[in-house]
Image (tube, coloured by chain):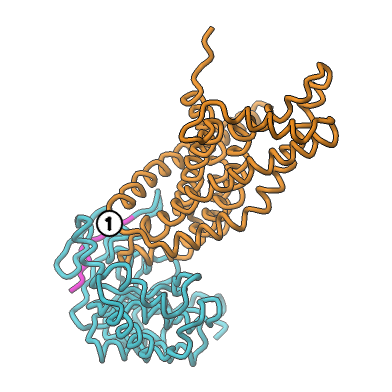
Chain colours: A cyan, B orange
Amino acid sequence: MIEFRDVHKSFGDRPVLQGLSFHVRKGESYVIMGPSGSGKSTTLLHMVGVHRADRGRVLVQGIDVADAGIEELTALRQRIGMVFQGGALLNWLNVYDNVALPLRETRSLPEAEVKERVEEAIKLVWLWSDREKLPSELSGGMRKRVGLARAIVTRPEIILYDEPTAGLDPAMSLQIDHLILDMKRRLGVTSVVVTHDIPCATRVGDRIGIISGGRIDVEGDPGILDSRDPCVLRFLGHGSIPGDVR
Amino acid sequence: MLAAVGNSARMLYGEILVSVRGAGASVGLLIDTAQRLVSGRVRIRPVLDQMFAGGVLTIPIVVLVSLFMGMVLALQTGLELLKFGQQDLVGVIVSVAMCREIGPIITGIILSAAVGSAMAAELGTMSVSDELTALDVMTVDKTRFLVLPRVLALAVMCPILTLFADLVGIVGAGIVGVNRLNVGLQLFITTTVEALRGTALFSLPKDLYVGLFKAIIFGIVIAVVGCAAGMRATNGAQGVGDATRRAVRISILLIVVLNYILTGLFFGVVSR
């Protein structure tokens, strides 16, 4: 479904991805973890062709994103939904219009069908009563849920989540995790979740890959986070504090 | 001392490079926008929203600045004309100057500062908060969705505001002419109308329609430069600030240069 083969990417003289390789199976939830600045979000943006690899191949549904032309990339992007860290909602549109945006701007659907699909998506994230509100009137968690509704309204085959629980309290994080699982169960989508929230990763992930030094250092089921693997321990910060304050 | 000069020169070179790149990006965006205009539907509602935000809300400042520009122009020229007893010509000079040059230039500069900067800040904020990336991922055409309405709005509102500026500037000159230079009101009106009548096209004075044509071009330039600068913003709040400054700088520079070129085109060069 999604495959990274020895992908390298630098911004200026700063290498971010250095031989990144992994694959995500159809219908799977793959979680990418790693410290800040390790290239997690950059990896997601490679999947939708916002960034192009300097070297290596990024295959999504058999299409080599790095070499895809505009039309091929557009067709691919229309099969992918992405939930951004801050929601990335347009602040002059209310919740309803934000969710309707990709349908109105990129699909020639009759307004009745747009309404039906938008209503379904907003109800899935429990925000129907807030559909008239502007993004500035919403909490961080609500904005992420609107972002999720906007990502699923086009009925994508793949959903990419960039830090879906960052900055949220535990109760709201739990709600978002349940929504991610709900989307997978109801819609059968393939999910790639970028996070450094361990509870989120263990709840939503079928497999977890930890990025370090621009490549997947260790990969496995959520149980790897309990392992004594030095890469996992390094990511979790064990032994990084002098005198071990814990 | 030498090091300071060297640093300043390096900074100036960097600024010039950034401005040239910004102008290049603006040209690319202008071509994209023109293609969208001829190749598909235009939604009226966003254009009207932008006309209101970018044009209607700017009327008070355009009116105030133009009024005082007209008054000061009348005062300065009138005082000189007074020495030769030719103060009756103040209406002629001010009306021609306002319609040909000052109206469009003043409107263009005000719109650059008030509206072009706002466009750069708005799109810059969208750029640094992933909203533009989100539009890309959703395959929403950013040029059609964000840029085209803004360009059309300013292409319509800039000449309308210029017309306001011309009229109010002439009224300001009239106030000074009548009250400070003792020009009769009727004489002021007659000489002004006569001066503008000149070579008319479809009953529209050349001085006026050339000024309005310039304003259309300025409106397009301001919107395109503002959008291009905003869409290229990176690096958080500082990047948005840089984009805003760059938009104002480049659009004012382009307005001044284009104004000279358009004046040369329409009024020709004076032969020896």
Specify the quadrant of the image occupied by residue A10.
Answer: bottom left
Q: Can I make out residue B118 in this image?
A: yes
- Helix, strand or loop under label 1: loop
Three-letter amino acid code at the position of disc 1: Ala
- Residue lying at 52% horizontally and 30% vertically, measured from the top left: B206
Q: In the displayed structure, would residue B181 be above or below residue A47?
A: above
Using the image as rendered, state which of residue B44 and residue B2 is in the foreground. B44
- Is A196 within the magenta? no
In this image, A125 relative to A58: left or right? right
Residue drawn at point x = 51 percent, y = 33 percent: B210
Q: Quadrant of the C terminus of chain A?
A: bottom right
User: Horizontal and vertical percent for residue B13?
Assistant: 53, 33
The foreground one among B13 and B177 is: B177
Q: Residue at x 26, y 91 (%)?
A: A185
Q: In which quadrant is the N terminus of chain A drawn?
A: bottom left
Circle 1 residue: A53
Horizontal side of A67 relative to A235 (left or right) equals: left
A214 with respect to B185 (left or right): left
Q: Is residue A143 above or below residue B108?
A: below
The quarter of the picture where residue A33 lies is bottom left
Instruction: Give the percent coordinates (x, y) of residue B254.
Output: 51, 36
Indicate the position of residue B127 as horizontal and vertical percent values: 46, 60
User: Is B203 drawn above or below residue A8 in the view shown?
Assistant: above
Q: Residues within 10 Å of mark 1 (few under 14, many from 20)?
A: many
Q: Residue at x 45, y 51 (%)?
A: B151
Left or right placement of residue A75 versus residue B221 in this view: left
User: Overall secondary structure of the magenta stretch?
Assistant: strand
Q: Give the magenta part as a residue range.
A: A1-9
Instruction: Please state the horizontal and vertical placement of residue B108, each as a whole percent of the image.
Output: 57, 42
Task: Pick the residue in front: B35 or B19.
Answer: B35
Q: Is residue A238 visible?
A: no
